[in-house]
Amino acid sequence: MSNVKAYAAKSATRDLEPFELDRREPTAEDVEIEILYCGVCHSDIHTVKNDWKNAKYPSVPGHEIIGRVTKTGENATNFKEGQLVGVGCMVDSCQTCSACKDNLEQYCENGATFTYNSEDKHLGGHTFGGYSEKVVVDKKFVLNIPENLDVKAVAPLLCAGITTWSPLQQWNVKKGDKVGVIGLGGLGHMGVKLANAMGAHVVMITTSASKTEDAKDLGAHEVLISKDQKQMAQHQNSFDFLLNTIPVGHDVNPYISLLKRDATMVLVGAIEPLDPIHGGGLVGGRKRLAGSLIGGIKETQEMLDFCGEHNIVSDVEMIDIQNINNAYDRMIKSDVKYRFVIDMKSLKNNQ
Ligand SMILES: [Zn+2]
Ligand SMILES: [Zn+2]
C-alpha cells in the first residue's frame, strides 16, 4: 500500500481539509496513476454535504481525473508508464450482468463501483476519489486521453462530457436536427459543444437573457429564453431532441410542449422529484420523456476520441486544492464558466 495526500470532508457540516489515505499496490489488472488534474462536479458537493443521504465519511470526492501512468500490473499491457490517461465516475463493475455485457457498466445490475463513496472491494471501507495524489484503478476503467488536447480542460469530459454525449448518441442526434440544450452550466455547455460538432442546429434554452452571448460563443445557433411566453410559443412542437440539464426538480411541462411528435426529452441533471407531469402533453404528440446516467466505458472512449478529432474541451477555471471550499460556494451560486479544475500539483504544498 502507499499512503497519499488528499483532501476530505470529515462530516456533512465540515469544510474539506487535508487528509491522508491508502492506495492499494497495483494488482496484475491494475494501473497506478499520478493525478495531474481533477474536475469539480456538482455530485462532489452533493456527496460531501450528504444531500443524497448516502455519504460515507471521510469523503474524498473527484471523478474527472486526468493523470499519468506510474505503474502497471502485468496484465495491464495496454498501458505504459508515462501515458496520459483518465478515470471517470466508475472504477469497477461486475462484468457479468446484462448491462455490463452491453458495455453499459453505469447500469450494472449488481451495482457499479463508483470512483468515490462506493464499497472498496480491495481495501474494505469506501472508495476515495480524485482529490488526491494518486489512484489505482482496474485497467478496464482507465481511458486513453488524446495528447493533442489542452489536458487540464479534458478533465470535465469524464463526467460532464460523457453525461451529455451518451444521450446524444443513444437518441441518434444527427446533422440538421434541431436540438435544445436546457440550462447553461457544466453539463449544458458540453451539450452545446458536442451537439454543434455533430452538426445539429443547437438552441440554448435558458431562463436568463444575460447568457445569450456566452451560449453563442460556445456554439449555440439560437437562444430561447424560457421565461418569455412568446418565444416559447414560437418554438412549440419544433424540436427533434431536448437535453435537459437542469440539476434540480422543476416543471418539465413547458419543455415537453417544445418537442415535435415522437421526439424525446432526456433528463441528465435532475435526480429528484419533478413537478407533476401533465399526461396530455405527452399523449398529444406521442412524446417521450427519458433519463440517462453518465455513459459506459466504451462510449466514454468514443467521446474522448471524437473530442480529440474535433478539438473539443471544457471551458475551465483552474484552482489550487486549498481553494476548494470557496469553489464549492461559487458553484452553488453558478459562478463559474463552466467547470473548476483542481491543479493537483497544489496538493504538494501541504506538508
Ligand atoms: Zn460528475
Ligand atoms: Zn454488471
Image: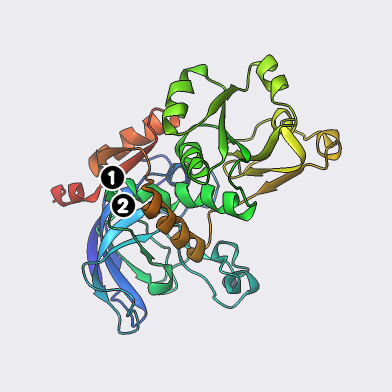
Residue 286 relative to residue 159: left or right: right
Q: Which disc, if any, is residue 131?
A: 2
Does the residue at mark 2 contact the one at mark 1 (Cβ under 8 Å)?
yes
Q: Give the amino acid type for the residue marked by disc 2 in the picture.
A: Tyr
Q: Residue at x 63, y 35 (%)?
A: 249
Say how the picture is coloured: rainbow
Q: Residues within 10 Å of mark 1 (few under 14, many from 20)?
A: many
Which mark is in front, 2 or 1? 1
Which percent across, then down, holds residue 317?
A: 30, 36
Task: Determine the secondary structure under disc 2.
Answer: loop
Q: Position of residue 57 (x, y in %)?
A: 41, 54
Residue plotted at (24% across, 58% down): 133
The residue under the point 55% across, 61% down is: 106
Q: Is residue 316 visible?
A: yes
In the rendered image, residue 264, in percent from the top left (x then y), is placed at: 71, 44
The front one of 247 and 57 is 247
**Which residue is tagged 1?**
342
- The amino acid beneath tag 1 is Ile
Image mark for residue 183: none
CA gap, disc 2 and disc 1: 8 Å
Residue 69 quadrant: bottom left
Q: Nearer the viewer, residue 60 or 90?
A: 90
Q: Residue at x 75, y 44 (%)?
A: 288
What is the quadrant of residue 329 in the picture? top left
Identify whether 134 is placed above or below 344. below
Left or right: 223 in relation to 236: left
Label 1 SS = strand
* Between 171 and 2, the one nearer to me in the picture: 171
Of labels 2 and 1, earlier in sequence is 2
The N terminus lies in quadrant: bottom left
